[in-house]
Amino acid sequence: MSAFTHLSINQLIHMTQESSDVQIVDIRDAASFQAGHIANSINLNNENISHFIADADMDKPLVVVCYHGMSSQGAASYLHEQGFDAVYSLDGGYSAWSLANS
């Protein structure tokens, strides 16, 4: 069994509509994050990851977003190893999200 679950754009939309407990982390660089990101997402990087892990709710769903849905898979696996129960990698990443929501 995989440490994380692949999540489509539509599944993320439904997940966030059904619950406000969804945590979204965006692992793209700061400039890309500033240029645009999913509402209520956190820009996660090497400088703030330990603080995020310490403060986050390990029981709430965690969605990892990158550029195209590739790098988020490794980050999702890592975050699952750190103790998060329900970890998701957004298929297509922010690029797909941006296209679907433009």
Image (cartoon, grey):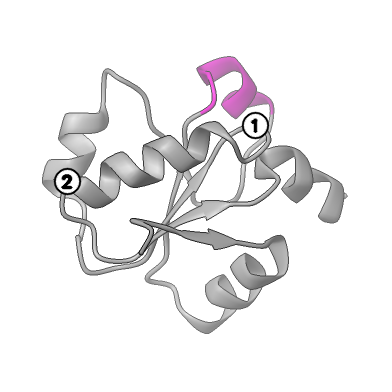
Nearer to the camera, 28 or 72: 72
Number of labels in the image equals 2
Residue for point 23% across, 39% down: 52
Verify whether residue 57 appears in magenta: no
Considering the numbered disc 2 on the image, is that residue within a helix, a strand or a loop? Answer: loop
Q: Is residue 26 left or right of residue 11?
A: left
Graded by Cα atoms within 10 Å as few (under 14), some (14 to 19) or many (20 or more), the crowding at tag 1 reads many
Q: Which residue is mark 1?
A: 67
Residue for point 41% across, 36% down: 74
* Amino acid at dot 1: Tyr
* Amino acid at dot 2: Gln
Nearer to the camera, 65 or 34: 65
Q: Is residue 67 left or right of residue 71?
A: right
Q: Badges 2 and 1: C-beta atoms under 8 Å apart?
A: no
The residue sitting at the front extreme is: 1
Q: Is residue 44 left or right of residue 50?
A: right
Q: Is residue 68 above or below residue 81?
A: above
Mark sitting earlier along the chain (2/1): 1
Q: Which residue is mark 2?
A: 82
**Range of residues picked out in magenta:** 28-35
Residue for point 58% across, 28% down: 33
